Image (spheres, rainbow, N blue to C red):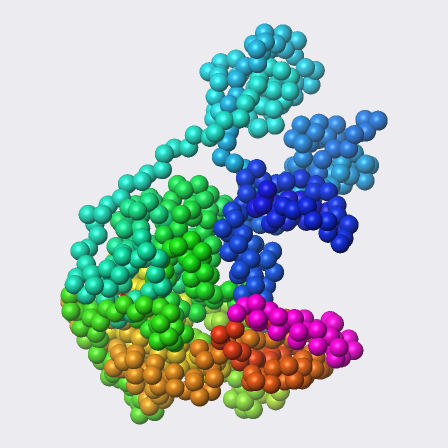
Amino acid sequence: MPGLRVHVPVGTRFAIGVVVRIHSDEPEFKTKPIRSTLDTEPVLDAHMLSLTEWVSRDTFSSWGETIQAALPVGLNYMSEKRIRTVPHLFPSPKGADILNDVDLAGSISLEEAEKRWGDKMIQKLVTGGFLDIIEEPKTTMKSESDWMTDWASDGRRLLNELIEDPPKRNPAWFKLAPILMDLELPMPMSRLLDETGAKEHQIRKWIDLGILESRKVVRTLTEPDRRMYPERMHALNEEQQEACAPILEAFPNPAKPFILFGVTGSGKTEVYIQALYTCFVAGKSGIVLVPEIALTPQTVQRFKRVFGDNIAVMHSRLTDRERYNTWMDIRSGRKTIVIGARSAVFAPVQNLGLIIIDEEHDSSYRQEDPAPRYDARDVAMHRAEMSGAVVVLGSATPSLTTLHATAKGLMTLLRLKGRHADAALPQVTVVDLKLYKHAMRGALAVPVHTAMEEALSRGEQAIVLFNRRGYARFMMCTSCGATCDCPNCSVTLTYHRTSDSLRCHYCGYSERVPRVCGSCTQATIEEQGSGTQKVEEELEAHFPNARILRMDRDTTSRRDSHASILNAFGKGEADILVGTQLVSKGLDFPNVTVVAVVHSDTELAFPSYKSAERMFQLLTQVAGRSGRAEKPGVVFLQTYKPDHPSIIHATHHDFESFAREEMRLRKSLLWPPYSKLITFEFKDRDSQRVADVAQAFASVLNQESSDMPVLGPAPSAIHRMMHEYRWELLVKSDPMWSSLAREEWLNRIFKEYALVRPPGGTSVRINVK
Ligand code: ADP
Ligand code: ZN
């Protein structure tokens, strides 16, 4: 059946695959039999098979990779080593008990067996030929059925006989005998196991003896709690109603995707909730995508208040088991509204009615590594089109790609121009750091420090953003200027004070801080730049009475710590929240009246055509955290580049002007959305070989695509990573191309390249993104 996973021989090994089609066309190659099917029910339905196939074409990845991305860990292709007994003429001199147990269980995971009986013993039995190691899939997808277990027709009598004449060695399963006598049968296997504490294989033994019998029945699950609380929804204000109406009208009549463009605090979330409610009442399910870091309890709570237990939350901090259970809840229809990050776009909901993508401009919607390098927005729109669902993108700073699509009539623009209840947008002040060189209080210029002090004295709160991108603290020799770099990745190592070590943020390499400089042997290595920790310490020094919380990757690595930090801040247990981009998104704290950005222009240090857009988005988002309720807010942007358009327009909350200027620039340089970028990435351990291959590939591209600009080849921004050298080539392709046309072009390029490939070039890996 399509959608089932199967265990199949590949070469000398076994692998897990997914059936995508049943046919009787004879293939050109020799086939082998399927070893076993893993699932009794498909893990993917026809809809998901077709969606994943489309994604694989759209992203130059394999269908298998895409399917893997769509399935929860545990239902993918993972297998494990297990042992089972080998029929033998002579009994083993040792370990008869072990063999007996393994036999009864059918098979046992090698890991578990070694834990139970010691790896030496197991090894002995394997080399003696009594045990066999096999590779088995890890989890299987069982239909939601159960085995109703009852006495066999002669069962009670047989049991009595057995108790009178017990088996010799008193095996584990036999210990159940007295318990069984007292049980009220029939009962489902799952309950039987619960009540007796027995293992399923032990019950099976009783069935084999003809004492118990079982038949398959549909599992009765506890009825899901479908209660909802529409009375908790806010009544939409006039502007919100106007924006919401076309969405509601679209439910019976599929329409173009909507882009809900509303300033921060305008109530986009309220519109989502209203739309979801309508969708739910119509008996359909919905998916809400939010950026991973905005997937806070605060956000989830706003939906749960109204939709109660119908909400399934999918985020990266779930354990594999939780992820699997959530997935099953959705698949079985017990939960019909999904909130999650990027990969929730593949949630197995039935009867999809609505997909919402909040903060649609966010870069986390694009998966970079590993393949498939998909964009959840594209997948969402395609999936919605396939199932006749409505799509709503929302943002205060829509991506220029989305704006472009709107201008071309491919999306419908909905506006929310004001904040709810006319809360004022915060007043934004640009602070030119060049002028305050001698008037700094730690990381903050004097006027910023003063404003924060005043706010704190009124009992209000402040957020300090320190954008870490391309800017972290590092060690430099003040005599010769040499920095401490990662030996694997050619990036500067970051200094961590807590462990007094230097660490690479890409490969994890770490070393102790050297006492003397490796280049000039002077003992003048000193800390440079700063990180959130340093900013925190400076804040502590300059606000001695304030309670400060820090939120960055170091403090949020523990499960749930992200949530507990925000929770504490929300409850007013701290006065200042300092952190990286983590603090910029989706937070709604009415008592925050000052937001300060330590260095507004660090984003520009990152080499990308999107830098200005990202910087504008970041500044607008973080500014939106200030003054969200009655109290007016202020925002300070400290910068070395006060004249940069992203800063000037962010100051006036003027997205339109920013977009207009930036679009003009993109058009003249043919950057997206006026082109679609295709990146070729070359990787190899040999720096010369990878350069040669990149050159050869570039010459093919230039010949075959004379009408499309080709950039490079050039060494990648991080030239060396994990001992590999990397080069890149960029093609600005026609944005109107169909994925089929692109695929054909790509095949042609690779064919041509094969003819001119330099010697040894086959070892160079080429990624297409
Ligand atoms: P956005 O998602 O656009 O940033 P939110 O939905 O978070 O905006 O709204 C900002 C604040 O205003 C929230 O605290 C929200 O509860 C409140 N709010 C928005 N619309 C309404 C409404 N119609 N009635 C009551 N409160 C509202
Ligand atoms: Zn490294």
Magenta residues, start to end: 738-765
**Which residue is painted at 35% across and 76% down in the image?**
407
Compared with residue 530, is residue 410 higher up or lower down, i.e. above or below? above
In the figure, is residue 326 to the left or right of 416?
A: right
Instruction: Point out the residue furthest to the right here.
Output: 89
* Residue 501 appears anywhere in the view: no
**Which residue is painted at 35% across and 72% down in the image?**
409
Residue 207 sits in quarter: top right
Magenta stretch containing residue 239, yes or no? no
Q: Residue 435, how many percent across, how many down? A: 31, 92
**Which residue is painted at 63% across and 22% down in the image?**
205
Q: Residue 692, how many percent across, how many down? A: 71, 82
Residue 548 sits in quarter: bottom left
The main secondary structure of the magenta stretch is helix
**Quarter of the image containing the C terminus?**
bottom right
Residue 703 sits in quarter: bottom right
Q: Assign ligand 1 to one image quadrant.
A: bottom left
Q: How many marks?
A: 0
From the viewer's side, name the closer residue of 600 and 505.
600
From the viewer's side, name the closer residue of 119 and 263.
263
**Quarter of the image containing the N terminus?**
top right
